[in-house]
Image (tube, rainbow, N blue to C red):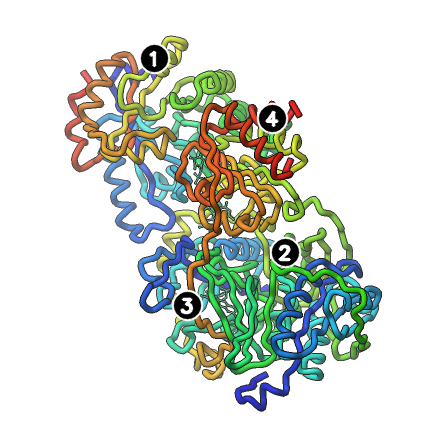
Amino acid sequence: MRYHIENKVYHVEILPPKQDSENLERDLDVFAEKYTRVMDSGYCACITDNAMGHLSFQGTEMIEELGLPVLPEQVMIHLNTFHTREDLDNILSYCVEKGIKYLLVVSGDGSERLPRLKPSDIGVQGTESITSVELLQYITREYPGKFVLGVAFNPYEPEDHEFAKLKRKLWAGASFIITQPIIEKNAVVDKLIAEYPDVPVIVEAWMSKKLHLLSDAVGYTIPENTEYDPIATLKLLHQAYPKNGFYLSLLGFKTQYDLIRDLWV
Amino acid sequence: MIAKTYIEKAEYRNIWVIGELLSGEIQPVTYELIGAARGLADARQCEVWTVLIGAGAGAGAGSLFAYGTDTVVVVDDSRLDGFQDEIEAKVLVRLIKKYKPEVVLCGATTRGRALIPRVAVMANCGLTADCTGLSIDPENGDLLQTRPAFGGNILATIRCPNHRPQMATVRPRVMKALEPDISRVGRIIREGILDTDADKMKRIIEIFHSREGALNLSDAQVIIAGGRGMKGPEGFRLLKDFAFRVGGAVGASRAAVDSGWIPYAHQVGQTGQTVQAKLYIACGISGQIQHLVGMQSCETIVAIDKDPDTPMMQMADIAIVGDIFEIIPEIMNELAKS
Amino acid sequence: MKIVVCIKQVPASNDAKIDPETKRIIREGQKAIMNPFDTYALEEGVRMKEKYGGEVIALTMGPPKAEAVLREAISAGADRGILLSDRVFGGSDTWATSYALARAIEKIGDVDLVICGKQAIDGDTAQVGPGIASHLDWMQATYVMAVDSIEDNNITVKRMHEDGYDVCELRLPAVLTVVKDINTPRVPTLKGRLAAQKSEIPVLKPEDIGADPDKLGLNGSPTRVVKTQPPEPRQTDTLRIEGSPRECAQALVRELKFRGLV
Ligand SMILES: Cc1cc2nc3c(=O)[nH]c(=O)nc-3n(C[C@H](O)[C@H](O)[C@H](O)COP(=O)(O)OP(=O)(O)OC[C@H]3O[C@@H](n4cnc5c(N)ncnc54)[C@H](O)[C@@H]3O)c2cc1C
Ligand SMILES: Cc1cc2nc3c(=O)[nH]c(=O)nc-3n(C[C@H](O)[C@H](O)[C@H](O)COP(=O)(O)OP(=O)(O)OC[C@H]3O[C@@H](n4cnc5c(N)ncnc54)[C@H](O)[C@@H]3O)c2cc1C
């Protein structure tokens, strides 16, 4: 992860098409185009896993089916707890085979159509449900040395609770952190960086103009009519967090992509 | 059977209730249906009949008169041990053809919903599912059947103008049983089963009685329910403590169940259970219609939410605005004092 | 084994709106999905095929666009799909729907097992499965939570009841309706989805399945929906409690005690 920060490599989020896509061919093309563009720019493509509980195709399937190249420093797969054991192992072994080493391990959002890992699936006892902590333990145990594992940090959750969770996640094998999106300098993120000087922290910047979506994602209310300029915000965040990496969520490839090229200086 | 004219329809008379038996015991839904049937029979000036089919079905027959039945038809045969829907359906169709009831009501239970559609197809008549209202159209004597559809978003009124009998199912705890009147009397008719009724027989290998899988939320007097606002499995641990304190059960919204915070058996709503508790405390549940249809007939509804304007907060009897994680511990403190 | 899985296309959400003029349900513009309960029926069929060999056929009756759920079924493991679509089928109640599906199953021929979902989330009746069994005069098992074995033309299943469950054996051919406890449906793969897009889906009309048009659609339906309306809201004067958490808790407990609820 240090490599990304030192070389100013953005983490660019890309969402695979949804299962119920009405125009799958088009969506596949768009995905391939975005992915290729991220590769060409030297950035790191971060492929989500059924984001917000929407049933979508897997990043690994997309890479396989579309024959996309894997540059090990430039691909990160998100992995949540909504999989069958079999699917989980398929995804992980595919990653090993293709040299995908960065995983962002999250609990994730479920939906009725998504299976959820059961404690018995991955040999865990004494808990009713699997969270990212158990999933991290499973991956480090079954695939030792194969992956560089990251976890999410939510500065909007009660602080003590979130720091305690983070401690468990790091203990379970995580070695880098990506925050939930922030739109200005954030005291909790500052504290995180101060408390874990040795762990790379990637700050997530919200690149959509639609702030209400951010409210939904993080569960705290942002006044509806707040004016929001994502590019200006990203600039400010770079100034505020000069030593951190950046993860761009919902980046507009048509309108914003060319504007970010020279922002990180 | 097709019955279009007044004369054809007049051949069909009386309101029937198909009794629900579990291990030979008459279930409450039977009394509830008899209560509803009594009202219809009075409007049509006819009798209420109850049909009991099963091994050992005769035992409780006499007790039904007090609840409003005039006639009980008993089909008691050892071949009916366990739940033999194919046989029961054939027997019922035979009885319907013989006695020609005008209306047939059945519980919308797992057994009723297996049996009665089979009967309706064979008897060539319409069947309305999960009725919440039954009345007689004063103009033509047809049964008007009201039922929710689209997960409770719509109430549809359904009629079967050209077929008799008119058949309907009703969920448990929707209708009210009458106060028993032990001075009421009636007659019992015994019917048997024919070998041709029993040509398709299941081999029942094992029967397990357990209330665990079903987790009878529907019997609970107090339900403490949580939604997405509970934030995770820890939130539900808090609710379990709360429920334990007040002797209640824990319910949940689908959002909480789908997130894996609590098993599906706890889900209340359209795709979960329907409950009728005396007290329902909704914690961090916004109250989407699919949830409301499962709990809106609870007697007292309390909502706790930080958003004062959710549908749940609007429809609740008592609405508390605030953070659940701060309020629930205070409520438990307060309860501990007394 | 030749297995038919009956699948209904339903609106994605239940926010049915009523046209204030015509009092009819507005269905246009709604996104349509596979009935959630049918995903379990399909998965069970596909698992049986994987175990015992044979073929899984997805069958639906609906408008032309219902073809989409058949493609989804194929991407999740069905071998082929059949669509019953014609104006004459329109307006069918559960009697007529199960009649049409039963005729199609006969037409397919040599079917060993029909699997349905427990119920559809729009019509919500749970009547079509047993209705099909009745029209075919086959045995049935409803609310099936597990299929234990299939041997010598007998199938052993676990049926869920309010007071527990039973294990019973029935003769094939038979109809099952399944609940969500039965399995965890697989999520379709991209590969499967791309293949499904290419498969041919035959569209059958009443004459193709030898159905009597008088038993189909509105004509063949004994039930008539005479009126639809939104439900009456629950009438309440809400007592609003605000203040510090302690004040709220005190006020609530006082009120519940007053009402004799705790
Ligand atoms: C076909 C179909 C069938 C369905 N069947 C069901 C069903 O059977 N049962 C069911 O429940 N749903 C069902 N749903 C889903 C339903 O539409 C809703 O999505 C679901 O009920 C929402 O759950 P919720 O109220 O917990 O979540 P939300 O709507 O997200 O509500 C969460 C609430 O918690 C509050 N909150 C958050 N944090 C706090 C805090 N700290 N303190 C206080 N309050 C807080 C928020 O203000 C909000 O009001 C179905 C949907 C469909 C389409
Ligand atoms: C408001 C409203 C109320 C209604 N009330 C009634 C009523 O009380 N009685 C009545 O007879 N009809 C009623 N209907 C009509 C009923 O919805 C239709 O007949 C519908 O085609 C099937 O019924 P269902 O949706 O209840 O399915 P269910 O019986 O709940 O479906 C069970 C299973 O049968 C299979 N299945 C159902 N439909 C199809 C299909 N088209 N293609 C393939 N497989 C299928 C699926 O496997 C499904 O999981 C009503 C319709 C509306 C709009």
- Residue B111 percent location from the top left of the image: 67, 62
Mark number displayed over residue B332: 4
Out of C61 and A233, give the one closest to the viewer: A233
For the residues carrying marks 4 and 1, which lies nearer the camera in this image?
Answer: 4
For the point 64% across and 66% down, the residue is B36
Q: Amino acid at mark 1?
A: Asp
For the point 54% across and 42% down, the residue is B301
Please name the residue that numbered disc 3 is placed on: C62
Whether residue B296 appears in this view of the structure is yes
Q: Amino acid at mark 3?
A: Gly
> Could you classify mark 4 by the number of other residues whose Cα lies within 10 Å: few (under 14), some (14-19), or many (20 or more)?
some
Q: What element does badge 4 sit on?
A: helix
Residue that extends furthest to the bottom in the rendered view of this protein: B7
What is the distance, in whole Å, between disc 2 and disc 1 at their CAs?
56 Å
For the residues carrying marks 2 and 1, which lies nearer the camera in this image?
Answer: 2
Mark number displayed over residue A190: 1
- Residue B296 percent location from the top left of the image: 53, 49
Left or right of C19? Residue A120 is: right
Q: What element does badge 2 sit on?
A: loop
Subunit under mark 3? C
Q: Is residue B256 above or below residue B170?
A: above
Q: Are marks 3 and 1 in contact (CB under 8 Å)?
A: no
Q: What element does badge 1 sit on?
A: helix
What is the distance, in whole Å, between disc 4 and disc 2 at their CAs?
31 Å
